[in-house]
Image (tube, helix red, strand yellow):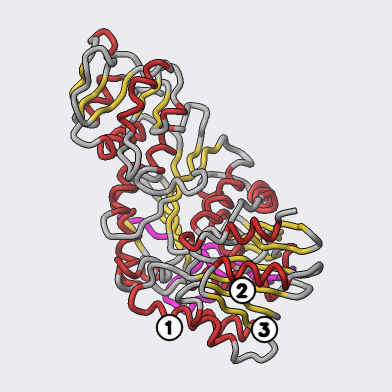
Amino acid sequence: MPGMTIENIAAACEGTFVGDRNLVTKEIAGAVTDSRQVQKDYLFIPIKGARVDGHDFIPQVFEKGALVVLSDHALPEETGPYILVSSTTEAMKKIAAFYRTQLSCKVVGITGSVGKTSTKEMIASVLEQRYKVLKTEGNFNNEIGLPLTIFKIRAKHEVAVLEMGISDFGEMHRLAAMAQPDIGVITNIGLCHLENLGTRDGILQAKTEMFDHLQVDGTVILNGDDDKLSTKKEVNGKPVIFYGVGADSAFDIKKDIYATDIENHGLEGMCAKIHTPQGDFDAKIPIPGEHNVYNALAGTAVGLQLGLSIREIAQGIASVQTIAGRTNLLHVKGMTVIDDCYNANPVSMKASIDVLAHTSGRRIAVLGDMGELGAEEKELHRSIGKAVAASGIDALFCAGTLAEEYASEAKANPECEVHYKKTREEMTEELLAYVKEGDTVLVKASHFMEFPKVVEALTKE
């Protein structure tokens, strides 16, 4: 890893190196927090968890060839070389920020209330048409996951696409200080994490903390159809690039990139004409849902900023793939299961219900509670029940304390069969007896509801 000598690492995290001074000019080959991933000449960063303390594995990582470790306490001399720090997690963030300064690749930082992961996948798919790209894997978008992702960037990577997720004020400052984006993308300002952030204005304030850590010539790309984001017309003295659906705006902005002629082809995806300053093109988006048109627009905006041609951008959009838990289509037992159960909030719930409404066969929504919605949680759950009733889908299965609000509102449509159970287990048992060949089943809930177990039950042979 370029520039990542032991002495530079110790200086970056304000730690004290203890060990053979002849080693201080040697570079580490990688940095991990999982002792099982340690390889020769790696830096091991032990993290104290609720049940496991990574410090307990320090002897083993030296046996596997680790060059040096961090430690928040003195180690026996015979253990191996280490950097003594007050907090290994804080040290890791400082080390990641330092490593970022050693890198020549461009960094795209992505945040927003909804659609961060799908937008990240779209942007990466577009950029991969020309560049070697590293992107955030899984849910590695927080104060532990982001530095680990940054540590994976190597000389071969020309662009890093980094997702950044927050739930409180100050978090984005800490994340963006590590990522130091060349391009900052915000998808929307929704209703996530209201418990901590209070209002959508609070969410806007927290998300836009990213702007304080952009590169000097950094570019900001925002969803111009979002009423809150549309107020940010200039960042650090540079005009914002706005994207959206339709040329006209309800707000006082000009959309630089926009979509028209949108066609919904159900589970086959979406088609749209995308208009850009460099020309227009027809986009085929192989993932269902109008929200993916917005993802394609964000991908187009980033692609143009990094010099891609219209042809390359169109090819990247057409090549994007879904991942587990994110509108992932599973065909099993003659049914189509829409696995969208990684997480949920009011905006993404309504988008997924709209996807289901455009499918064929008997359409069944399987929904669980949404978390972190604050004082308005019951009303927000009722709004989802109203969306179910209005959508025309055939059946609703729901479970959870707050999901009862879905059921009460969905019953307004007498043609929608409503099944409510307090527990996921009870609901799943009733659901398995109900589904049949030809059904399309949407499964969605917040992560704590463990709805991947519902998908597993539906798809089990």
- Cα–Cα gap, marks 2 and 1: 18 Å
Q: What residue is pinned by disc 1?
A: 379
Residue, disc 3: 417
Q: Residues within 10 Å of mark 1 (few under 14, many from 20)?
A: some
Pick the residue in front: 4 or 443. Answer: 443
Residue 335: percent from the left, percent from the top? Answer: 77, 64
Structural crowding at the residue carrying mark 2, measured as other residues with C-alpha within 10 Å and reported as few (<14), some (14–19) or many (≥20): many
The count of marks equals 3
Amino acid type shown at disc 1 = Glu
Query: Foreground mark, 2 or 3?
Result: 3
x 42%, y 81%: residue: 378
Check if residue 239 falls in the magenta segment.
yes
Report which quarter residue 325 is drawn in: bottom right
For image coordinates 47% across by 28% down, the residue present is: 37
Residue type, mark 3 in image? Glu
258 to the left or right of 314? left
Pointers 2 and 1 in contact (C-beta within 8 Å): no
Please tell me which of labels 2 and 3 falls first in the chain: 2
Amino acid at dot 2: Ile
Give whichever of 8, 456 is nearer the camera. 456
Mark 1–mark 3 distance (CA, rounded to whole Å): 22 Å
Residue denoted by label 2: 353
Residues in magenta, as a range? 236-265
